[in-house]
Amino acid sequence: MFFCSSQLFGADVSVNPACRDITVVGDSYVAVGTFGKIDLISKSGEVTNLTSNTTINLNAVFYADNKIIAVGDSGIILLSEDIATFKIIYGETKEKINDIIYFNNKFILATNNGELLVSQNLKNWQKISLPVGGNIVSLSADAESCFGVTDVGEIIRTSDAEGWDVFDFNEQYRGYIKPSFFRKVLITKNWIVIVGQHEDDSPAVMFSSDGNVWIERSLNYIDDNGIPKVFTAIPNDVSYASENDKFYIACDNGDISVLSSCSKCNKTYHIADKNLYSVLMKDNILAVVGEGFYVKIIN
């Protein structure tokens, strides 16, 4: 089953109120969502609404170099340098911007229709059009490389933010792994992880050590009654905790799936009756946001 980007997170989030992304800012968090919503969230869970000066849907937020940058529909980019006020800047596109990352001293924006915007100063932009069939929905980077994924199962990568390689995952693994549609990519010290869903509406989680060869991760776990089960909720985001070497996956239907190096230690937790769209696990604090402007901080 193929789906358009407005349905990427289960329900139609273009009209349903939702927090779509969250990031760490100092000792707090900032979350963004539909209708221009921006919240400052303390580690105790106290929420303060910030003025965004827009009602356009926001899809992603990023913090770097003492700047908060939020991006969203209709090419909107918001910039704050004081964690209080936001101004609208422009990136020379009217496409929906799905994600933002900082790599190789450049800001990279992922948009619909296979376009990337690249800038060193958030003023002058280079537009890069990639030969992909889907919308670029997620980006992740470390010191050496930047990866992105599309919502029709393509993987893009670069080592310099200028030349990009495109890898058609579904074509390459045809007959071995069910066709998949990606939602998020995450680079950690040892792994590159992609989450999404298969065409049969089952969850998809892919791992690679170098981005060249991919394996599908087992989603088996043992419930509290000792009964073997399999994760069934569709994942929307993934975060990694180096302190315990576990991956935390925010899913539809309010589930948090936890993947460990040992599959017998995998767990799933139902924390809400809402779709969860973004998750962060850092310093033993779990921060989750989702449908209905849901915010949850678990220490």
Image (spheres, rainbow, N blue to C red):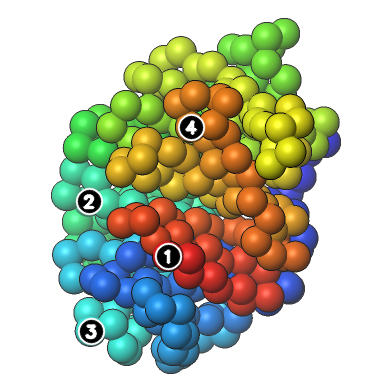
Could you classify mark 4 by the number of other residues whose Cα lies within 10 Å: few (under 14), some (14-19), or many (20 or more)? some
Q: Secondary structure at mark 3?
A: loop
Which residue is labeled 2 in the image?
Answer: 106
Q: Secondary structure at mark 2?
A: strand
Q: Is residue 32 above or below residue 155?
A: below
Residue 51 rendering spot, x and y as whole percentages: 43, 91
Q: Reading the chain from its start, which is encountered first: label 2 or label 1? A: 2
Q: Nearer the viewer, residue 97 or 9?
A: 9
Residue at 46% in and 85% down: 47
Amino acid type of the residue that numbered disc 2 sits on in the rendered structure = Lys
Residue at 45% in and 78% down: 45
Q: Nearer the viewer, mark 1 or mark 3?
A: 1
Q: Reading the chain from its start, which is encountered first: label 4 or label 2? A: 2
Q: Nearer the viewer, residue 8 or 115?
A: 8
Q: Residue furthest front?
A: 225
Quadrant (top left, top right, bottom left, bottom right) of the N terminus: top right
Disc 4 and disc 1 in contact, CB within 8 angstroms: no
Which residue is labeled 4 in the image?
Answer: 260
Q: Reading the chain from its start, which is encountered first: label 4 or label 3? A: 3
Q: Nearer the viewer, residue 168 or 10?
A: 10
Taking 29 as reference, is 83 left or right?
left
Compute the Cα span from label 4 to label 1: 19 Å
